[in-house]
Image (spheres, helix red, strand yellow):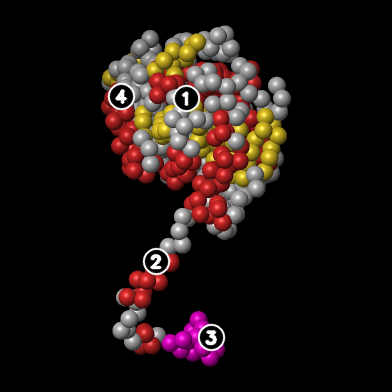
Amino acid sequence: MAAAKVWFMDARAKRFLESTAIKGRQILEYSGWLDRLHPGDIVAVKTHMGEAYNVGYLRPIIVRTLVEALKEIGCRPFVTDTTTMPYHPWISRTVAMDYLETANQNGFNHSSMGCPVVIADGWLGTDDVVVDLDGRGTYLNKQFVSRAIADADALLSVAHFKGHPAGGYGGSLKNIGVGGASKRGKMNLHGALAGDKPVVDVSKCKGRDCDWWQTCEDCCPEGAIQVTEEGLKIDQEACVYCFACANLCINMAGVGAIQRFDFLPALGRRIADSALAVMMTKEEGKCFFLNYAIDITPCCDCYGWADTPIVNGLGVFASYDPVAVDKACMDIMNEAPGLLNSEAEEFGALEPGAKKLNIIKGKDVEPQIYGGVENGMGTTEYELEKVPLDRSQKAIAKFYPEVRAKKLKSMYSKNHPLKGIDTASFGRTTEGMKNPRHPKK
Ligand code: SF4
Ligand code: SF4
């Protein structure tokens, strides 16, 4: 496979038009992807709208700016994500109704996006299509792809590049591999349909002496957990491997009687296979991938918090190849110095060249990338092209359609804010002052 082109613009911003949101649109236009679309095409703009109280997810204006570009060429975009498995007891996005509430609170709605916000796998996550991977998958033979994404003419993936507890990292592959799968597609990529289960050591459970025992029972969607005075009973046959109980037991009870299996070499490849299934619903060239490598936190946007970033913002990256764009972000992140007061310092990963997330997570975090190469979806060979910023008057007119101060002239002429006010009585000038900081001295 030939090297893939990865376009990028850095994260620094000191002047007009250097907003990360505007850079995303400029990369999209520069890449030529928009020329492959036709008026009337329905475009799924797939992003992550953030868990409740998470503050690291991509800001809504980043997505809206891309939606505007699609609308200007006559496409019909919709902003989308899918229902989650529980993942943890308090997740707020497991049914469409709850996800839409959280999305609205996080700033994603029809009004802010300028287009519909759609939960692509429907009310309970069962609106999907089965895609046969034609033997290309490393682990998956078939996958459930959310219907709204599968039925769209084109897919624009808008991913936040950062770390991830189960997948090692999150970028384009996870944005469509996990986020494009329906709820039962997530069960499949967690390995539940193949028979993977959490690791359970009932002897560690504190039984009803555990402050969290009731939540432990309540969080299981299968009713597979029972906690008695004697301890934990778990029906592993019924388990769909959603991670909720394991996250509770480790993070809140601090026990680890139920742990995630998290065999990343398999999970990463399943994510890559699922991403391939999503791409197989589209004609060649109708998928495009944007990674926003900013606020690079060690965890994902599925938790209700966001830790400090482990490296500074790297910028916006784009490609037709989800493997290449993820690999480019990974490499450039590793080359960057780590940040103090972050997990990069805590785990000794500050040096430029240190494999940040490998060190922080204590494992090789790239199996998604290996899986994407193995199933033929993409390549780790990439050619990086820096996209020049368009600073023209035409460009500024696109984002700032008028000089709004112009309006003030006529308003001021009728009703100036300082009209009739004895302005001199409000203070003194700096003229002739020896020390403007301490004018009385
Ligand atoms: S037992 Fe299985 S299905 Fe139930 S909460 Fe735990 S991981 Fe999820
Ligand atoms: S959270 Fe862990 S320790 Fe507490 S009841 Fe559940 S399995 Fe037992």
> For the residue with label 1, is its CB less than 8 Å from the closest atom of ligand 1?
no
The dot on residue 137 is none
Which structural element holds mark 2? Answer: helix
Nearer to us in this view, 311 or 21: 21
Does residue 197 show up magenta in the picture? Answer: no
Please give the name of the residue rendered at 52% of the width and 41% of the height, measured from the top-left corner: 297
Badge number at residue 123: 4
Residue identified by numbered label 3: 435
**Of marks 3 and 4, the one in the foreground:** 4
Local packing at callout 2 (Cα closer than 10 Å; few below 14, some 14-19, many 20+) is few
| Mark 2 close to ligand 1, CB under 8 Å | no
Query: Badges 4 and 1: C-beta atoms under 8 Å apart?
Result: no
Q: CA distance from mark 3 to mark 2?
A: 38 Å
Q: CA distance from mark 1 to mark 2?
A: 42 Å
The Cα atoms of the two marked residues, 4 and 1, are separated by 22 Å
Q: Which residue is mark 1?
A: 153
Q: Considering the numbered disc 4 on the image, is that residue within a helix, a strand or a loop?
A: loop
Q: Amino acid at mark 3?
A: Asn
- Magenta extent: 428-441
- Name the spot of residue 108 as percent of width and height, x first: 37, 40
Q: Are marks 3 and 4 in contact (CB under 8 Å)?
A: no
Q: Which x, y percent locates residue 128?
A: 39, 18
Sequence-earlier tag: 3 or 4 = 4
